[in-house]
């Protein structure tokens, strides 16, 4: 996975150089996959050619996202070609690179797995810049089939993603009324807009502090937690107006 065009002997050499042998690297890869929550992934070899090395699109997306957090890796897979010692110019097998925002990540093909491609693309949807990840597996016609499926997948994803205003600044989240009949609202202190797939359910969890008798406007008195799948955000909640407290008459009649 570390060069624009790879071969299985590269992986074997890396295993020997890094850990002294293939078995040790396979063991480490399986441990890393488990740590990333890739429960459907099993490595039987270091190159991926073994039919016993298996994964799923969801797991490969997790792997791709994690790998792209490494700047050097991201830079390498984004290269259309590279000049290597002895080998000379090596061309990237990712022929979609640079098209439709595609910036990587990895091609693959075996008789058992078919054509496979883990893709990352930088897109702008509804004015919001976003990096999307996808994976296709089991495609006929090797890499040509994988690239064809990806050309269909990315536009379909874009058409299903839209900017949703999850909460707007000054949206009323809660209301209060005091024993002395003073009322007011508690509002969101900031706006949150997310790119979400159509039909995504956003869960709201509100946590409020106990309010004192007096409080200036704009004081933080709680938190709104927004949850959509694995995505979360917390928005401070504030008083829209000041809490003045009870007047002298109310206090006198109650012995305060």
Image (cartoon, rainbow, N blue to C red):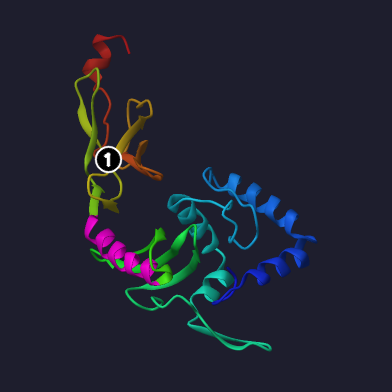
The prevailing secondary structure element of the residues shown in magenta is helix
Q: Is residue 18 left or right of residue 128?
A: right
Q: Nearer the viewer, residue 219 or 16?
A: 16
The structure residue drawn at horizontal position 49% and vertical position 57%, both measured from the top left corner, is 112
Q: Nearer the viewer, residue 230 or 187?
A: 230
State which region is magenta. 144-162
Q: Is residue 53 left or right of residue 178?
A: right
Q: Quadrant of residue 115?
A: bottom left
Q: Residues within 10 Å of mark 1 (few under 14, many from 20)?
A: few
The structure residue drawn at horizontal position 37% and vertical position 25%, both measured from the top left corner, is 210
Within the magenta stretch, is there residue 199? no
Q: Position of residue 101 (x, y in %)?
A: 35, 73
The structure residue drawn at horizontal position 61% and vertical position 73%, both measured from the top left corner, is 7
Q: Quadrant of the N terminus?
A: bottom right
Q: Position of residue 95 (x, y in %)?
A: 41, 78
Within the magenta stretch, is there residue 150? yes
Q: Position of residue 139 (x, y in %)?
A: 39, 61
Q: Quadrant of residue 207?
A: top left
The structure residue drawn at horizontal position 45% and vertical position 75%, both measured from the top left corner, is 94
Q: Which residue is mark 1?
A: 201
Q: Position of residue 252 (x, y in %)?
A: 26, 13
253 shown above or below 228: above
């Amino acid at each position: 996975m570390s060069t624009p065009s790879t071969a299985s002997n590269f992986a074997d050499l890396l295993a020997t150089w890094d850990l002294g042998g293939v078995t040790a690297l396979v063991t480490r890869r399986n441990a890393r996959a488990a740590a990333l929550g890739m429960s459907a992934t099993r490595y039987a070899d270091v190159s991926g050619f073994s039919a016993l090395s298996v994964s799923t699109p969801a797991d490969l997306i997790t792997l791709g996202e994690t790998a792209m957090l490494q700047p050097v890796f991201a830079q390498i897979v984004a290269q259309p070609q590279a000049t290597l010692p002895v080998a000379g110019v090596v061309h990237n097998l990712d022929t979609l690179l640079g098209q439709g925002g595609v910036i990587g990540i990895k091609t693959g093909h075996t008789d058992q797995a078919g054509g496979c491609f883990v893709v990352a693309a930088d897109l702008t949807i509804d004015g919001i810049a976003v990096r999307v990840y996808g994976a296709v597996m089991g495609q006929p016609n090797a890499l040509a089939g994988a690239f064809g499926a990806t050309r269909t997948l990315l536009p379909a994803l874009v058409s299903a993603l839209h900017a949703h205003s999850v909460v707007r600044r000054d949206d009323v989240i809660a209301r209060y009324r005091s024993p002395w009949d003073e009322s007011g609202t508690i509002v969101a202190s900031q706006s949150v807009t997310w790119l979400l797939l159509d039909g995504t359910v956003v869960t709201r969890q509100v946590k409020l502090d106990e309010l004192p008798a007096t409080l200036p406007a704009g004081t933080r008195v709680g938190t709104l937690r927004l949850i959509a799948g694995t995505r979360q955000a917390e928005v401070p909640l504030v008083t829209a107006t000041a809490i003045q407290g009870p007047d002298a008459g109310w206090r006198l009649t109650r012995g305060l």
